[in-house]
């Protein structure tokens, strides 16, 4: 069952009279209980996509077209883009939640962490303060803060980076949302802590049958976490398929390049493959395929016309002229 | 020939009370480390935040003054010499930083940025500046035309190339690379890693390569040292350490490192708690509160780095009983 459908989403920014097409016609679905990873480099538009879903795009950004359909009572009546700020506020934190890369800047430094965890309950479910406190402590324990009672009254500054990320996760899922958007949830953390947080997210996701949209630039994290993957480049989805297929049989030259240029623990090569050149600046995207300036398999046609995202095999979509 | 040797290097930061100005505590950021790097080789220094790996780099370059210990370059002690004398040596050791955005002066053209070290260390005569700048841009893969541009006109990867060109301007023998690719996009990382390796071969450079990503360390290093709370807990040849890790911390670090293969088998080693604060380093082995294999002796006695030709480890699991009491 589809929980979220994003159709032809375009979010542009207008800076110094220049148009920056950060997200430029993105389509994807997230199924109930599924982990969809959005992978891409900086400037690929993955974070702007998530902000658009959350209704957090502000000046100078603007959603210029598209639909974001959220399935609430098994009917796709809700286009999130048509909702008022007030209606979005009701959805955020209850139906859709988000965790960010940097927990320190997302927590209020002067409010007790326990109260920050309990806040969403008091807003969305009208629980009393005492009841909310009880549930918040329970939630803190579920995310691995074992002495929740004691730590309820502490402040974010008293927590380590990994513990703060646990607090963020507790805040995000206390109302049992149906979709959790995790934007680089472990990028700021150490490797050993990252592993623990990823385990925690996977456990909570399956216990709550929650859908998750995981945004990352790390192929290792994708391999461990995702069911399906969308590869983004310069505001467009270049390839979309299952986790297994993506790693076994990547089709778009950009995806292939990414796979080959990361150094791996499990092999030894003298030289790494590279993707030549640099990511083009968003005000200066090439005509035709966005990857045509760097693509090793580029053809004349690629520089003229942008390929569509086409299904080349069941469950495997590719945006590339090599396949169509 | 050994290019650099570090002996019993220590750095302690004193914490002072803001009100009274008296010492309230000490942070042992680097707590007695030893290693050497052969000419033309790379030592990878890996560890999590707070392990002291960046401080180590800064101590070698004397960007920080060591509290104790000795650093020698080609057999000559450079930690005790006067600042004036050190400045003459300075051109031999350089650094490449993590963030290419913040280390380049945004008001200077690339040419001026590169002329600065040429001028200070009198590498070439002023008449040759232009030619030398063009040569430097060429070897890091930038175009001659880029010389009049400003840093903001470049992408992150190109800026890191400028950072490398600046380090090379003084014709150094030894370069500390402090997380040189961590801030870069995945598709650009491999370009910079390959460039650093090419330059090493061409100019017989010696690297201390600091990174937190095990995959990057594995790829660039000849030897690798694993740091935890200011100490080296394991050091050895890279293949040896990665294929037969001995220290429980190294093993945990490797098991936690995500592998880009959805079908990879994972035997994750779970660690208790988080890294203790460097303000309050546990007694005995500093890793014992998190170690899945901790024994009684680990709480009391600090294990020494056991000397072995290719692979050393500081852990009681690998020490005979006689070692425990030295």
Image: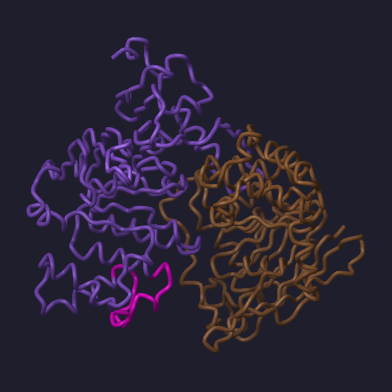
Chain colours: A brown, B purple
Specify start and end residues of the magenta stretch as a single range. B139-158
Picture coordinates of residue B205 (x, y %)? 24, 53
Residue A17 lies in the magenta stretch: no
**Residue at the top extreme, as displayed:** B322
Residue B242 position by quadrant: top left
Residue A216: give x, y in percent of width and height.
60, 57
Q: Measuring 36% from the left and 39% from the top, which residue is drawn there?
A: B224
Against B282, residue B186 (above or below) is below
**Horizontal side of residue B275 vs B231, given as left or right:** right
Please state which of residues B280 and A99 is positioned toward the viewer in this rendering.
Answer: B280
Could you tell me which residue is drawn at 33 percent across and 58 percent down? B97
Residue A266 seen: no
Q: Is residue A61 left or right of residue B285?
A: right
Which image quarter holds the C terminus of chain A?
Answer: bottom right
Q: How many marks?
A: 0
Q: Position of residue A61 (x, y in %)?
A: 62, 78
Q: Is residue A12 visible?
A: yes
Q: Is residue B129 above or below residue A166?
A: below
Does the stretch in magenta take in B154? yes
Q: Quadrant of the N terminus of chain A?
A: bottom right
Q: Nearer the viewer, residue B128 or B212?
A: B212
In the picture as drawn, the residue positioned furthest to the front comes out as B20
Q: Position of residue A41 (x, y in %)?
A: 55, 65
Relative side of B51 to A221, left or right = left
Instruction: Examine the image and state in which quarter residue B292 appears.
Output: top right
Specify the principal SS of the magenta part: helix
B20 or B255: nearer the eye? B20
């Amino acid at each position: 069952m589809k929980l979220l459908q994003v159709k032809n989403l375009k979010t542009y920014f207008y800076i110094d009279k220049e148009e920056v097409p950060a997200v430029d016609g993105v389509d994807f679905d997230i199924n109930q209980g599924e982990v969809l990873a959005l992978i891409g480099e900086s400037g690929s538009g993955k974070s702007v996509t998530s902000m658009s879903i959350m209704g957090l795009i502000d000046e100078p950004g603007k959603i210029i077209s598209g639909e974001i359909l959220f399935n609430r009572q098994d009917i796709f009546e809700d286009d999130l883009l048509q909702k008022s700020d007030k209606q979005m506020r009701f959805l955020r934190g209850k139906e859709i939640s988000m965790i960010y890369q940097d927990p320190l800047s997302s927590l209020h430094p002067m409010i007790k962490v326990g109260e920050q965890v309990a806040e969403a309950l008091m807003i969305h479910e009208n629980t009393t303060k005492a009841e909310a406190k009880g549930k918040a402590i329970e939630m803190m324990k579920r995310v691995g803060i074992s002495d929740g009672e004691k730590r309820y009254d502490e402040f974010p500054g008293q927590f380590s980076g990994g513990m703060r990320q646990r607090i963020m996760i507790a805040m995000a899922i206390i109302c049992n949302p149906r979709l959790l958007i995790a934007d680089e949830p472990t990028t700021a953390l150490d490797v050993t802590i990252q592993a623990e947080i990823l385990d925690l997210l996977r456990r909570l996701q399956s216990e709550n049958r929650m859908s998750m949209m995981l945004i990352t630039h790390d192929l290792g994290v994708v391999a461990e976490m995702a069911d399906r993957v969308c590869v983004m480049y310069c505001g467009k989805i270049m390839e979309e398929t299952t986790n297994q297929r993506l790693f076994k049989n990547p089709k778009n030259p950009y995806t292939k390049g990414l796979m080959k240029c990361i150094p791996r623990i499990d092999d030894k090569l003298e030289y790494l493959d590279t993707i030549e050149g640099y990511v083009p600046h968003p005000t200066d995207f090439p005509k035709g395929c966005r990857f045509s300036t760097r693509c090793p398999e580029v053809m004349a046609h690629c520089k003229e016309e942008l390929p569509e995202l086409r299904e080349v095999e069941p469950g495997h979509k590719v945006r590339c002229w090599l396949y169509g | 020939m050994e290019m650099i040797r570090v002996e019993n290097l220590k750095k302690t930061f004193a914490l002072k009370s803001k009100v009274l100005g008296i010492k309230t505590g000490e942070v042992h950021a680097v707590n007695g480390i030893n290693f050497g790097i052969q000419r033309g080789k790379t030592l990878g220094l890996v560890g999590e935040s707070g392990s002291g790996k960046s401080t180590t780099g800064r101590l070698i370059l004397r960007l920080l003054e060591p509290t104790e210990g000795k650093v020698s370059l080609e057999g000559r002690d450079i930690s005790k010499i006067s600042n004036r004398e050190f400045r003459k040596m300075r051109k031999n050791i350089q650094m490449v930083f993590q963030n290419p955005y913040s280390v380049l002066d945004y008001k200077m053209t690339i040419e001026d940025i590169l002329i600065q070290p040429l001028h200070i260390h009198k590498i070439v005569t002023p008449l040759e500046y232009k030619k030398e700048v063009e040569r430097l841009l060429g070897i890091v893969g930038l175009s001659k035309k880029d010389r009049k541009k400003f840093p903001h006109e470049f992408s992150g990867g190109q800026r890191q190339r400028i950072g490398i060109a600046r380090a090379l301007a003084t014709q150094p023998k030894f370069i500390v690379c402090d997380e040189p690719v961590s801030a870069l996009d995945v598709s650009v990382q491999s370009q910079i890693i390959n460039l650093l390796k090419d330059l090493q071969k061409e100019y017989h450079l010696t690297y201390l390569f600091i990174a937190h990503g095990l995959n990057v360390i594995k790829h660039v290093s000849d030897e690798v040292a694993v740091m935890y709370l200011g100490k080296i807990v394991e050091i050895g040849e890279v293949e040896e350490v990665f294929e037969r890790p001995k220290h429980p911390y190294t093993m945990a670090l490797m098991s936690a490192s995500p592998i880009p293969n959805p079908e990879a088998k994972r035997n994750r080693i779970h660690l208790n708690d988080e890294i203790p604060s460097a303000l309050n380093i546990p007694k005995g082995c500093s890793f014992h509160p998190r170690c899945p294999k901790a024994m009684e002796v680990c709480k009391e006695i600090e294990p020494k780095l056991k000397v072995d030709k290719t692979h050393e480890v500081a852990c009681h699991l690998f020490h005979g009983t006689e070692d425990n009491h030295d």
